Amino acid sequence: MDELWSFLRNKNNQLWVFVGFDAGSRFWMNFELGSRTTHTATKLVKQIKHYLGILAQANPLKIATNKLAAYNNALQSVFTDIDDVYLQIVKKRIKMRLITVKKCFVKGTEADFTDTLWINLYNYNYRCHHKSLKLPLTHPGTSKFQKNWSHRTPAWQWN
């Protein structure tokens, strides 16, 4: 689960989009619009629980969020009857630059998340283009719709 910031008409009218998605496929299971609070997170978690139905009881459900306390509160109040493991990804930024990323296991251990972490590692290294790795094209386009950069993934950089 994660949340995205947006706005309606002007930036003073903030809107948060809480998203629940499958880590492997990036398929969005549900979303909720609202303020960045436990109330909105709880609405999202209740919908996810509804969609998962009996599947959530078959295996431990793997949940990963950022450190927003609203997620922890929502999960504790909604997933009382579901076997789950919970990981928080804690990112530290200074002036919008990512400094550190830490894993905080709220419920469960690293062994519970090994498969998910490998999927994320693959996605990061082979599928996601990173702005810091882009290279200027030798013959850049002349219009604003033509490419001026070659976008690369970390794995591609070493080719």
Image (cartoon, helix red, strand yellow):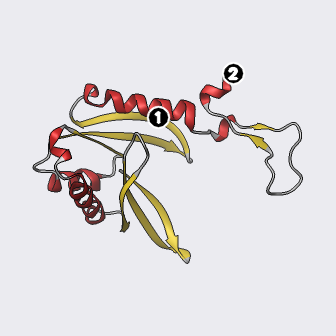
- The percent position of residue 86, horizontal first and vertical second, equals 25, 40
Residue indicated by mark 2: 159
Answer with the quarter of the image where residue 133 lies.
top right
Q: Are marks 1 and 2 in contact (CB under 8 Å)?
A: no
From what the image shows, is residue 56 above or below residue 156?
below
**Badge 1 density bin: few <14, some 14–19, many ≥20, Cα 10 Å:** few
The CA span between labels 1 and 2 is 27 Å
Q: Earlier in the sequence, mark 1 or mark 2?
A: 1
Which residue: 22% across, 56% down? 74
From what the image shows, is residue 45 above or below residue 101?
below
Which of discs 1 and 2 lies nearer the camera? The answer is 2
Three-letter amino acid code of the residue under disc 2 = Asn
**Badge 2 density bin: few <14, some 14–19, many ≥20, Cα 10 Å:** few
Q: Secondary structure at mark 1?
A: strand
- The percent position of residue 23, horizontal first and vertical second, equals 39, 42
Residue indicated by mark 1: 100
Three-letter amino acid code of the residue under disc 1 = Thr
